[in-house]
Image: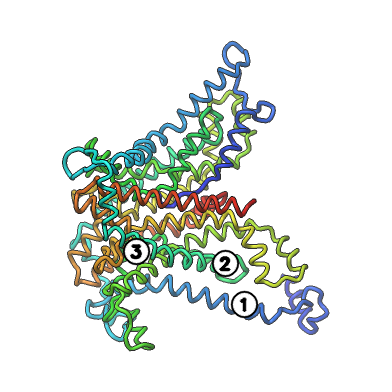
Amino acid sequence: MSTNTVSATVPSPTGEEIPWNKKQVPPAKIVGTIIGYLAMIAVSAFVLLPFFWMFLSSLKPNNEVYAIPIKWFPSVWHWENYVAIWTKSDMTTWLLNTIFFAVIVTLLQVFTGSFAAYGFSKIPFRGRTTLFLIYIATMAVPWQAYMIPQFKLVSAVGLSDTRWSIILLQAFGAFGVFMMKQFYDTIPEDLSEAGRLDGLSEFGIYWRIMLPLSGPSLAALAIITFTNTWNDYMGPLIYLRSQKLYTIQLGLKLFISQYNADFAMIMTGSVLSVLPILIVFLIGQKQFIAGIATSGMKG
Amino acid sequence: MSEEIGVVDDRQAVADHKTGSHGPGGGRRAPKIKQGKFNAKAISRRNLRNGLIFISPNFIGFICLTLLPTLTLFYIAFTKWSAFGNPVLNGVKNWVRLSHDKIFMTSVWNTIYYSIVHIPLTLVLAFALAVLLNSKLRGRAFFRTVAFFPYITSIVAAAQVWGMLFDPKSGPINSFLRLFISNPPGWLGSTAWAMPAVIVVGTWREVGYYMILLLAGLQTIPSELYEAAELDGTNGWQRFWHVTVPMMRPTLFFVMVTLTIGSFKILDLTLVMTDGGPGTSTLVLAQYIYRVAFERGDFGYASTVSLVLLAICMVVTLVQFWYNNLKED
């Protein structure tokens, strides 16, 4: 504490004489900083205003949602919308279905992804490069291009409109393999070598050495997969017909079409569809952002 | 679907393979096998078995759900396949039909329109924000989190909110614009303005994602390079073009590939927000595929259009690869 106050008071009278204070901040830099802050505020507003508007509208009387001039805050706060929506819609079913899909898909993706990544990164088997190149080549192929044959194939084995369709569709993505391989590639070979000398099987090395080291990467993969599954609209749209299997995205779309004039209620549903994933993101944002960042690192 | 996929350098994979097979000092030697004899063949067989065991859970799923469908596409694209029954080969008929299909042409044009505006807009914004976040401004952690919100928001909710914000008569955006101009655009109700509105939402949604990718790239540039450039008397603008951009080439390349494919495959945004309308003004290629296949049950012809989408994405990727290699040499 005391040193702090000393260093803070000393330079104040003649700032010029203190070596680290000599360099004047050029005016261009000050202007730059101000522009920087202004840009940050402008972009934050652009990003956040739709969220604020969505949330505030969900609490308004219907006729105030589109009031001219804009009324930001409701005259009466209709918190009861958040209670009513559960009886007006099958929100419970949709949420439970979505949680079910997201959890199962995440588990499968984390398991198969890290397992395969270990094989690609640490076991030098013949044909490894070729197989991995096939993975890479299909990356440039968007799902939209092969959704038809995929749908026909899944239907042909009788799995469309079942829970299986969504699970299969999402669980074997190549993304997990790439992400985990990038991570395993950074782990020194000596570690797995030491495991081999100690007589560990490959599975033992994966389970006892690699997995304990890959906590943050697995968390990143898990949270990204969870979010993607939660937000996926096209997959469920194509594969799920029965309403009892609907995910929150399909449910919300259905709800919007049923209550198309009940603006506040629609916004309530939208808030409820976004809120869980927002919480998940805020809890795991460090891993999430790190995971996204590493996926583009070596490109 | 995991839509955003990391590019892993193929040279990396090749390099791995090399060190794998001729590893330093035979470093990969497995524990001795039963006879206590070092046997390269046995080790290679054993590695093959182990490797396949490890990759198979994912790889089998990948083959069945991605690879097989993609390969099948090349066959179905030359067949007639209605909702019921089996595909029947019909030669180039689908392709002749495609060449006369005005709606197909419109959808290609709309996709290009979306891409041509969306890609530079997103890239410039994301790059500017990444540079901003890489400086030492206060509150950037908060800003980074906030910028990511749209990316994790579901398309349905985002499209709904923006659809209401863009409401031509009484939406907040037009009430705001009326302060300056008397006759603001009709947005989603107008054939001329629907696409710009879609682009705004697409950019809003993705800018945070690309910003993070670019920021990660920026942070790998050693600060000594900037210091050296500063000593040479360069200004900030010169440092940006002569240090930042060249050092960022790998990241920029990855971002360009992802962004381009992402723009060409855009589907759910227009499907939910405009359903391709008004008229066909926002009907994009992927949505045309969806419409022909799942609304009309014409799976054969839809596959032909799919193959075009696939070809475009492949060509774009290859061109960017080629350009990147050209620049590196």
SS assignment at label 3: helix
The Cα–Cα distance between marks 1 and 3, rounded to whole angstroms, is: 38 Å
Residue designated by label 3: B110
Figure label count? 3
* Front in this rendered view, residue B141 or B110: B110
Furthest toward the right, the residue is A17
Q: Earlier in the sequence, mark 3 or mark 2?
A: 3
Towards the viewer: A200 or B309:
B309
Residue B262 percent coordinates (x, y): 42, 56
Point out which mark residue A32 bears. 1
Question: Answer yes or no: do the residues labelled 1 and 2 have beta carbons within 8 Å?
Answer: no
Out of B73 and A91, give the one closest to the viewer: B73
Task: Classify residue B17 by image quadrant.
Answer: top right
Identity, as a three-letter code, of the amino acid under mark 3: Asn
Q: Which one is in front, A88 or A167?
A: A167
At label 1, the amino acid type is Gly
Residue identified by numbered label 2: B133
Q: Position of residue B107 (x, y in %)?
A: 31, 60
Among all residues in the image, which is located at the extreme top? B35
Q: Are marks 1 and 2 on the same chain?
A: no
Identified by mark 2, the residue type is Leu
1 or 3: mark nearer the eye: 3
